[in-house]
């Protein structure tokens, strides 16, 4: 049987990083539904993130997106985070929202556009120096829409050149996390479409380059836990962008579409040592709450990650190894399913109470009066949002 003290410690120590853009307005290309009380500034996003941390106790880091969270003084922003009991997490670069990037950014055929994109990536590393962030998260919208539009391998060469320059620029304690996505916004070729391409680049780059797995960035039916196991085995899993998908890159709450998949992913994380903070796997959310209340949705997402982690920690490794060694297919599967079918909510509630937290973080948030306060106070000004 799993050591329940070790399970409790692992759960108490797990951290989830929340995204600044999850607190702002967001939507689809059809409509952004504005919600009252949404942050108007990066500081207000941090104020909301601090509430999530207050009620979950496990979300001290907040990922920023540049330029959506652009400020004059990043040291001051980091100090604001610290005042709220937070730290600034991954810096997400944006080389996709500019007219110059119509044909790509670091893969663009024109060297002048490539230089502009690289300058932004370098600026993001400067920001990391100021904020103390460890990770630069790189997602490129680069690709082509039509066969023959550009040279596939030449684009890989341009990508490699830019990534190499960024890798050289990183400090000793900094990393670059390369994110892949199988399509969108490009529909014919995408320059970093899959884990193989991301891994090949990271392998050549060196120790500071790792792959980030966004759970929504795969074709339907892809076995994501297999990818996770392989990347961990190679020491190249830098982290996750957690979210749920039903169709494409839906960015819905993690664990909402397929909690069993999330369990299977976390099982591979745990089995391969990825939950140990020393492994450096960043558990980040990358979600947009288009129609639901944002702060409780982030809290719910964090709880979903915790529940999947708890179930995965409860797998009876000894019984599983014995069943596997005996070639007993049904018994092996049953061991895994027993863990998945355990109701871990009472265990997590207890762990929260031991930390002095309310066992029900969503209810605690609703009772806190914060939502009413921000709705009353945050009037006027431009509300921050996805793409704002
Ligand atoms: C885009 O599809 C990727 O998931 C990005 O990680 C992210 O959603 C965006 O860059 C916001 O930072
Ligand atoms: Zn992502
Ligand atoms: Zn995405």
Image: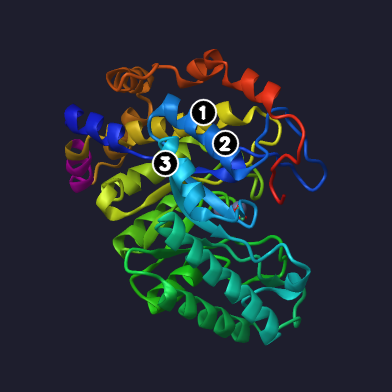
Q: Secondary structure at mark 2?
A: loop
Of the image marks 3 and 1, the number of the one nearer the N terminus: 3
- State which region is magenta: 319-326
Q: Which residue is mark 1?
A: 300
As for residue 277 lying within the magenta part, the answer is no
Quarter location, residue 331: top left
Q: Is residue 324 magenta?
A: yes
Q: Residues within 10 Å of mark 1 (few under 14, many from 20)?
A: many
Q: Which mark is residue 82?
A: 3
Q: Position of residue 338 (x, y in %)?
A: 32, 28
Q: Position of residue 39 (x, y in %)?
A: 65, 36
Q: Using a 10 Å C-alpha cutoff, classify the residue at mark 3 as few (fewer than 14 neighbours), some (14 to 19) or many (20 or more).
A: some
Which residue is disc 2 drawn over?
A: 253
Residue 378 placement (x, y as % from top left): 69, 29
- Is residue 202 visible to us here? yes
Residue positioned 32% across, 19% down in the render:
356
At a point 52% along the width and 83% down the height, the residue shown is: 161
Nearer to us: label 3 or label 2: 3
For the residues labelled 2 and 1, say whether their Cβ atoms are less than 8 Å apart: yes
């Amino acid at each position: 049987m799993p050591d329940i003290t070790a399970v409790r410690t692992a759960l108490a120590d797990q951290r989830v990083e929340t995204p600044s853009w999850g607190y702002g307005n967001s939507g689809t290309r059809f409509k952004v539904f504005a919600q009252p009380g949404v942050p108007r500034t990066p500081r207000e996003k941090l104020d909301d993130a601090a509430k999530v941390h207050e009620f979950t106790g496990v979300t001290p880091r907040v990922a920023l997106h540049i330029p959506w969270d652009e400020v004059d003084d990043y040291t001051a922003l980091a100090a604001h985070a610290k005042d709220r009991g937070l730290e600034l997490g991954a810096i997400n670069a944006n080389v996709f929202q500019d007219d110059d990037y119509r044909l790509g950014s670091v893969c663009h055929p024109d060297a002048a556009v490539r230089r502009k994109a690289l300058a932004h990536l370098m600026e993001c590393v400067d920001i990391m120096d100021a904020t103390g962030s460890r990770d630069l998260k790189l997602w490129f919208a680069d690709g082509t829409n039509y066969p023959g539009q550009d040279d596939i391998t030449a684009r890989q060469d341009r990508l490699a050149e830019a990534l190499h320059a960024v890798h050289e620029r990183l400090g000793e304690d900094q990393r670059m996390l390369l994110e892949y996505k199988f399509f969108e916004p490009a529909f014919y070729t995408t320059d970093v479409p899959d884990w193989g391409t991301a891994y090949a680049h990271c392998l050549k780059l060196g120790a500071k380059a790792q792959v980030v797995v966004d759970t929504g960035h795969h074709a339907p039916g892809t076995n994501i836990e297999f990818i996770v196991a392989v990347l961990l085995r190679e020491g190249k899993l830098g982290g996750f962008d957690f979210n749920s998908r039903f169709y494409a890159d839906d960015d819905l709450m993690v664990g909402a579409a397929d909690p069993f998949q999330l369990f299977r992913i976390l099982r591979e994380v745990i089995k391969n040592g990825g939950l140990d903070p020393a492994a450096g796997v960043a558990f980040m959310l990358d979600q947009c709450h288009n129609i639901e209340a944002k702060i409780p949705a982030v809290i719910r997402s964090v709880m979903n990650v915790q529940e999947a982690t708890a179930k995965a920690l409860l797998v009876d490794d000894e019984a599983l190894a014995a069943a596997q060694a005996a070639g007993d297919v049904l018994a092996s599967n049953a061991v895994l399913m027993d863990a998945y079918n355990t109701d871990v909510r009472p265990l997590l509630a207890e762990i929260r109470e031991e930390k002095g937290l309310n066992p029900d973080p969503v209810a605690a948030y609703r009772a806190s009066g914060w939502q009413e306060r921000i709705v009353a106070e945050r009037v006027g000004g431009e509300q921050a949002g996805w793409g704002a």
